[in-house]
Image: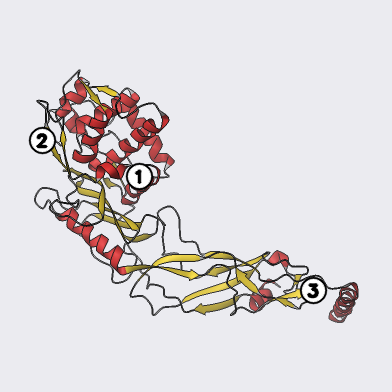
Amino acid sequence: MKSRLEKLLKIALSASIALPVLMTGTQTYADEIEIESDASLLLDYETGQILHEEDADEAKGIASMTKMLVEYILFEEIDAGNLNWDSEVIISDYAHRISQDYALSNVPLRAGEAYTVRELYEALAIYSANGATIALAEKIEGSEPDFVDRMRTLVDSFGIENYEIYNTTGLNNSYLDGDHYPDSDEDAENVMPAKGIAKVAMKLLENYPEVLETSSIPEKTFREGTQDVISMKNWNWMLEGLTHEREGVDGLKTGTTDFAGATFTGTATSDGQRLISVVMGAGDGFTNRSQRFVETGKLFDYGFDEWHYTTLVEQDVELTDIEPLPIKNGVEEEVKLKTTEALAYYLPNDKDEETLSYTFEPKEELLNDKGEIEAPVEAGDVVGELVLDDQEDIEFIDSEAKDAIQVAAADTVERAGFFTVFSNVIKDFFGSLKDRF
């Protein structure tokens, strides 16, 4: 009986909606750009749809992109009222010692002296200062290992897997002179997949968009008017006035170590759309210091110029290509169907030769053995769903693509009067007797 119903009621349609030619492997779409890095990812911030990915599920070194987690927790503390931007931070011997290593990115800190949270945060966000990062972590949790525990809890809450976090800076443990997470290896380093670090960026922008006010500053002076004055030029060279300036770029975080290579989580806006990009291992950061920004520029060009947002199925639209659903014991013999919600994706601009196919699948529990639905039926009652085919390769950072939308009755069909219903009962009775004999 079920197969009979499927033949009667599952109606396959073709709509004049363009879909991309999907590929298997690391590249999502045909004719996709090539990014010179170990891993790369591009997604639309508003929807979370992934527009490009390559090796984005493999854990790789994240270097100072780690510091986005520190920023998130700092904003949590500010929001909770546990800190304010003028709160004083006393510099420990550990934070001081790391800050004096100018082979690393640092601003000079004096042991035992007080700095404001704002000063240290700006040093972290603009100049990726490692000593300042450690000082903030110690202020918030008392020690860097305790702060690392909080970072791990935060990462878990984001649903990120396949990661390792050992310190707040993203440095290799070998640079920390033994002050590293208990029982971690001497050369351990933070790792996370590109999709993971993109989730961190999305959560940071979603909950604390004010981070962009600082990450977008091209250059600022640290401790102006003191003996420790230093010019902090942002390591994100895509900001206004810097060597790879690009309009719309306002964040977010670079990172470089021997293990990770040159990494960068970028974000930019154009015509009201925001994209988030990740490149990992885009060269070593020394022999070609521009590579990460060149590759990020390719991603932004691709995302902004080669994709468009398209509504595949409109909301509250009558499905004229689907046969109405038969009604039993109604004043009408059938009811037309309509969508209850819209379905929209980003699609490549040049993919308009393919068609979208979908199937109407009625709720079987509402149907009798003849494929009819019993009256009365109210307009808006959900009677089935529209299932889209071949959507498994359209991916979102937090979920797979939605592949079905609910379908409802377009009109109200009242139950017929007593004599009509009684007549149908008699017909069904004698029909069943005929089937027996």
Q: Quadrant of residue 164?
A: top left
Q: How is the image coloured?
A: secondary structure
Q: Quadrant of residue 95?
A: top left
Q: Residue tagged by mark 2?
A: 103
Left or right of residue 54: residue 129: left
Mark 1 → mark 2, Cα distance in angstroms:
31 Å
Left or right of residue 199: residue 91: left
Q: Amino acid at mark 1?
A: Pro
Mark 1 → mark 3, Cα distance in angstroms:
55 Å
Among the two numbered marks 1 and 2 on one chain, the one whose residue lies closer to the N terminus: 2
Q: Amino acid at mark 2?
A: Ala
Q: Position of residue 296 (x, y in %)?
A: 23, 57
Image marks 1 and 2: residues in contact by CB distance under 8 Å: no
Please tell me how crowded label 1 is: few (under 14), some (14-19), or many (20+) other residues with Cα within 10 Å.
few
Mark 3 → mark 2, Cα distance in angstroms:
82 Å
Nearer mark to the viewer, of 3 and 2: 3
Q: Which image quadrant: the C terminus?
A: bottom right
Please tell me how crowded label 2 is: few (under 14), some (14-19), or many (20+) other residues with Cα within 10 Å.
few
Q: Amino acid at mark 3?
A: Gly
Q: Residue tagged by mark 1?
A: 209
Q: Is residue 182 visible?
A: no
Among the two numbered marks 1 and 3 on one chain, the one whose residue lies closer to the N terminus: 1
Q: Residue tagged by mark 3?
A: 330
Image marks 3 and 2: residues in contact by CB distance under 8 Å: no
Q: Position of residue 426 (x, y in %)?
A: 90, 77
**Residue situated in front as seen by the camera: 106 or 86:** 86
* Label placed on residue 235: none
Q: Position of residue 59 (x, y in %)?
A: 30, 47
Q: Secondary structure at mark 2?
A: loop
